[in-house]
Structure formats: C-alpha cells, structure tokens
Amino acid sequence: ELPKPLPGAFRGEKMFLVFAGTAGSGKSSLVATLSKWMKEEVGLRLSVINLDPGAEVLPYEPNFDIRKFFTIRDIMRRYGLGPNGAFLKAAELLGEYERKIVRDPAFTGFYDYVLIDTPGQLEMFMFRPEGTKFLKRLEMMKPVLLIYIVDGSLAKSPEDLMTSYLLSLILQSKVELQVVTVINKIDLLSDQELDVVRMLIENPEEFAKMVADKVGGIAGDMLLDLAQVAEKYSPSERALAVSAKTGEGMKELYDLIHEVYCSCGDLT
Ligand code: GDP
Ligand code: MG
C-alpha cells in the first residue's frame, strides 16, 4: 500500500529533489520514469526542471528549461569555445541567471515536489562554485534532497562502483544535504553482478573490504576508511537499486523520498 499524501496535510510544503551523478548514469532517465510514476501512482503535483544546457533531447517535458536562456551549442558558437570551455562558461551563466531561474513559477509554484535534472557532466554543476551556490539558494527556499545516481553497470568493476558511490560524500561535504543513493541500470546486470550491488548497499564496509583486498596497499586502506565515512554520513538505509528503464524500484525510491519529506514537514 502506497503512502498516499493526506489531502492538504503536506500541500505546499514542497521539497526539491536534485538528481546528480556522473555523465550517463541516468539522471534524465530517472527524472522521467520517477516523475511519471509519482504522478500516475500517487497523484502528486510535480514540477520538473531541466538545468542541463547541453541536453539534446529530454525524455520528459520540463516545466522549466535552462535552454531557454542558453545552450552549450550557442555558447560554443558565440564565444568560439570547445565543449569543455562551453561548460565552464555555462556554469558562470548559471550563476548570473540564478535569481531569475529560482523565481520562475516552476520553482515557486504550488507543488509537492520539484524534480531537478542537472547537467550530464557532474563537474559543471557539482564541482563549480556556481552549482554549490545554486544548491544553497534552493535550501533557503525549501528542503533539498539530493538523489545521487551511481551507474550500476559499473558492477563489472567493483572498485569503480565503489569510487562512484563515494563521490556523493564530496558533494555532501560542501553543502549539508540529505542524500539518497540510487544504483541505476540494474536491468543490465547478471545475478552475480546484482549480488555485488546488493552487497554495496546492504553492507558497504564488507564491500569495501572485498575491494580493498583486490586493490591492496594504501589505496585499499583508504577505501576502507572512506567506507566507514560513507556509512556514517550516508547510511545504507538510504541506498537502493533501481532501473530507470524498466521502472523497477520506483516504489521503494518513492517510499524513501516520502520518508525524508515527512520528517522535513515535521520540522517546519
Ligand atoms: P544522464 O547523462 O545522467 O542524464 O543519463 P541519461 O538519462 O541520458 O542516460 C544515459 C544513457 O543510459 C541513455 O542511453 C539511457 O537510455 C541509458 N539508461 C539510463 N537509465 C538506464 C537504465 O536503468 N537501464 C538501461 N539499460 N539504460 C539506462
Ligand atoms: Mg541528462
């Protein structure tokens, strides 16, 4: 039985869901699948935002699209830049347009959740001061939950899966955010690889031990220490496996989001 929102109880409370993750991890796909699920199955009022100026096609219809202000293609042409330079310029522009962007009704309107898709390249939004500033501005408006997406197809290489999983810690160390970690693309995994993913979610320290044995030396020791930090600051109860392609895990993901939403609601 789904936790239906009580009529009126949380209306207008609103929470920002920011989807972050490395390029190609499935941010846009998950925004599309989860928003459709939340609308159809729970009947929530949602706003969907695209902040990726480099997006060519989107798998959803955004209520707000950064591309109405600038696109990577335009920036490359106008400033004579290559794609990397254009992404840096785009981060600057995001900072310049920030006030305008967050005043848009897609951000300020009467919604249960505002889902925010971020640029394909994690570094443009998350590892630039403009991105951090943007998140802080959102936090001043309403609670923010970061949905950090790990590309589950990395299960073929546990050390890469582990490091991608740990990246969310760096984001958390800059902006104090609640985080849910999602391992995506589980439809692509064999049973054995799925076990690897489950182990990372259910017992990150055990997982780290396995990887540390494989990696060895100081790098292995570091992974063990980092796994403890991960367990402390993004506990494994806040992690789960999904497929944006098949929709598997959407209910579980929504349950986690709803749990955070309710605890935020209690505070205000
Ligand atoms: P983004 O760069 O993080 O926004 O990633 P996208 O959502 O654009 O997805 C990158 C690629 O991965 C696309 O080709 C998607 O179709 C694919 N993809 C995303 N999620 C899944 C998934 O759950 N399963 C599979 N098999 N492919 C996926
Ligand atoms: Mg995308």
Image (spheres, rainbow, N blue to C red):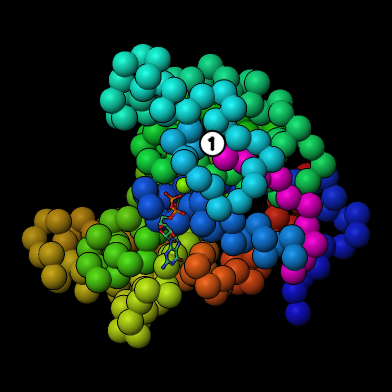
Q: Position of residue 40 (x, y in %)?
A: 75, 65
Residue at position x 47%, y 40% from top? 55
Q: Nearer the viewer, residue 226 or 75?
A: 75
Q: Is residue 260 above or below residue 210?
A: above
Residue at position x 37%, y 66% from top? 152
Residue at position x 47%, y 62% from top? 182
**Residue 141 shown in magenta:** no
Q: Residue furthest left?
A: 217
Q: Which residue is mark 1?
A: 51
Q: Nearer the viewer, residue 47 or 15?
A: 47
Does residue 136 appear anywhere in the picture? no
- Quadrant into which the C terminus falls: top right
**Residue 49 shown in magenta:** yes
Does residue 9 appear anywhere in the picture? yes
Q: Nearer the viewer, residue 39 or 204?
A: 39
Image quadrant assignment for residue 156: bottom left
- Kind of residue indicated by mark 1: Leu
Residue at position x 31%, y 78% from top? 193
Q: Is residue 15 above or below residue 3?
A: above
Disc 1 secondary structure class: loop
In the rendered structure, which segment of residues is drawn in magenta?
A: 41-51
Q: Is mark 1 within 8 Å of ligand 2?
A: no
Q: Is 76 left, or right, of 118 in this rendering? A: left
Q: Position of residue 175 (x, y in %)?
A: 49, 37
